[in-house]
Image: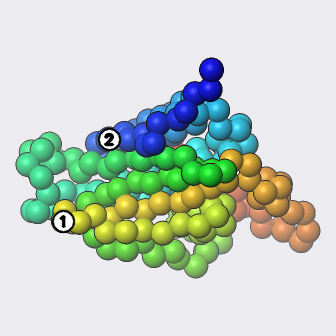
C-alpha cells in the first residue's frame, strides 16, 4: 500500500535554544515517514537548524506580541514542512517583520553564515510577511537528492578551512 504524505507538517515551539534540536528531530522524523532519501534528510536537518536559529534570534516578544508570549516572556516560532515534486519546502515563521538579510561571509566570525548556507544548498529560498499578524516566514526548497557538488568539499588551496570549521563549531556550541 502506497502512503501519501500529508500536505503539510507543522510544529509550534517556544523560541528557546532547545527549540533548534526539537525542530531538527521533527524534520528528520517527518522526512523519514515520507520516505525522503537519507542525503536529502541531512541537508534538510542542517537548513532547518539554520532557519530555526535565525527565527529564535528574531522571536523576542514585543508590546504587540500575543498575551501568551507577553506573560511567559517567550516568543514562538513555527516549523512547517511540505513535500514538492522531487523535494521538500522547509519554512520557519517568527514574529519579526524585518526581512532576512544575508551577510557577506567573514572568515573571522563565528556566526552569520546561515542564510549564505541556505542560498548555497537550497534550490531556491525566500520569505513572505505573515499577514495580518506581524512577522515573516522564511523558507527554503531542497531537492530529495542534493547535487554531488554540495555533498563533497572541493580540495584546493583552502588552508583556512580547518580554522573556519573550528570557528563554526565554536559558534554552534555557544547556541
Identify whether 23 is placed above or below 175: above
Whether 44 is drawn above or below 127: the answer is above
Crowding near the residue tagged with mark 2, few <14, some 14–19, many ≥20 C-alpha atoms within 10 Å: some
Which residue is at the far bottom?
A: 104
Q: Is residue 116 visible?
A: yes
> In the drawing, does residue 65 fall left or right of residue 161?
left
- Which of 165/52 is in front? 52
Q: CA distance from mark 2 to mark 1?
A: 20 Å
Specify the color scheme. Answer: rainbow
Q: Nearer the viewer, residue 31 or 167?
A: 31
Which residue is painted at 42% across and 47% down in the image?
A: 80
Residue 127 relative to residue 58: left or right: right
Residue 24 falls left or right of residue 19: right
**On the image, numbered disc 1 is attached to which residue?**
132
Instruction: Report crowding for label 1: few under 14, some 14 to 19, many 20 or more residues within 10 A (C-alpha).
Output: few
Pinpoint residue 51: horizontal percent, then vertical percent.
47, 56
The quadrant of the image that shows the N terminus is top right
For image coordinates 62% across by 26% down, the residue present is 2
Kindly identify which numbered label has been placed on residue 13.
2
Res 142 quadrant in image: bottom right
Q: Earlier in the sequence, mark 2 or mark 1?
A: 2
Question: SS at mark 1?
Answer: loop
Quadrant of the rendered structure where residue 72 is? top left
Residue lying farthest to the right in this orientation: 156
Q: Looking at the image, is 5 positioned above or below residue 145?
A: above
Residue 89, given in percent of the width and then of the height, sits at 53, 53
User: At 31% across and 57% down in the image, what residue appears?
Assistant: 94
Residue 170 shows in this picture: no
As helix, strand or loop, the secondary structure at mark 2 comes to strand
Residue 60 x, y percent position in the rendering: 24, 57
Amino acid at each position: 500500500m502506497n502512503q501519501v504524505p500529508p500536505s503539510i507538517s507543522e510544529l509550534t515551539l517556544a523560541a528557546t535554544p532547545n527549540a533548534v534540536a526539537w525542530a531538527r528531530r521533527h524534520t528528520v522524523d517527518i522526512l523519514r515517514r515520507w520516505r525522503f532519501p537519507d542525503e536529502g534528510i541531512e541537508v534538510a536537518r542542517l537548513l532547518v537548524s539554520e532557519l530555526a536559529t535565525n527565527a529564535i534570534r528574531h522571536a523576542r516578544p514585543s508590546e504587540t506580541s500575543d498575551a501568551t508570549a507577553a506573560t511567559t516572556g517567550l516568543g514562538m516560532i513555527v516549523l512547517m514542512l511540505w513535500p514538492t515534486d522531487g523535494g521538500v519546502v522547509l519554512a520557519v515563521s517568527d514574529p519579526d517583520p524585518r526581512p532576512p538579510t544575508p551577510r557577506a561571509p567573514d572568515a573571522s566570525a563565528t556566526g552569520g553564515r546561515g542564510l549564505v548556507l541556505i542560498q548555497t544548498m537550497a534550490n531556491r529560498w525566500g520569505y513572505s510577511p505573515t499577514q495580518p499578524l506581524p512577522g515573516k516566514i522564511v523558507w527554503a526548497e531542497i531537492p530529495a537528492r542534493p547535487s554531488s557538488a554540495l555533498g563533497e568539499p572541493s580540495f584546493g588551496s583552502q588552508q583556512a578551512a580547518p580554522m573556519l570549521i573550528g570557528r563554526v563549531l565554536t559558534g554552534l556550541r555557544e547556541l
